[in-house]
Image: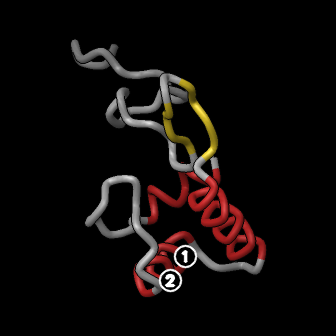
């Protein structure tokens, strides 16, 4: 608590709890890997290993027109950080 406001734990995801993580999908009530998104995750990891910043990776994904989990939204450095986290 800070100034009467409850603070969330640092490790808690503060996005929409019903939203699946990038790289996952549900088919017939089974959580499985989304193969296309898994390839995107590998590309993100490779770009980070090559020294690109989170902002540069997000810009690159936008330029390549890679869809986000929320189709139509642009990539944001925080999205990239969550995927790498």
Count the numbered circles shown: 2
Instruction: Classify 10 Å Cα crowding around label 1: few (below 14), some (14-19), many (20 and above).
Output: many
The residue shown at (77%, 72%) is 49
Residue wearing tag 2: 60
Q: Residue furthest left?
A: 4
Above or below: residue 43 compared with residue 17:
below
**Alpha carbon distance from label 2 to label 1:** 5 Å
Q: Which mark is residue 31?
A: none
Residue 34 position within the rendered picture, expressed as x and y whole percent measured from the top left: 58, 49
| Residue 43 located left or right of residue 56 | right
Q: Residue furthest front?
A: 28
Foreground pick, 41 / 50: 41
Please report the residue visible at 58 percent of the width from the left and 52 percent of the height from the top: 83
Residue at position x 35%, y 21% from top? 7
Quadrant housing the N terminus: top left
Residue 52 in percent (x, y) is at 64, 79
- In this picture, residue 8 sits left or right of residue 10: left
Q: Position of residue 4 (x, y in %)?
A: 22, 12
x 38%, y 35%: residue: 19
**Element type at mark 1:** helix
Q: Which residue is mark 1?
A: 57
Observer-nearest residue: 34 or 20?
Answer: 34
The secondary structure type at the circle numbered 2 is helix
């Amino acid at each position: 608590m800070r100034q009467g406001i409850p603070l969330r734990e640092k490790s808690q995801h503060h996005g929409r709890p019903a939203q699946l993580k990038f790289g996952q999908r549900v088919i017939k009530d089974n959580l499985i890997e989304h193969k296309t998104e898994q390839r995107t995750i590998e590309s993100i990891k490779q770009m980070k290993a090559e020294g690109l910043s989170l902002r540069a990776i997000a810009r690159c994904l936008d330029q390549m027109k890679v869809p986000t989990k929320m189709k139509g939204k642009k990539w944001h450095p925080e999205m990239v950080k969550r995927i790498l986290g």
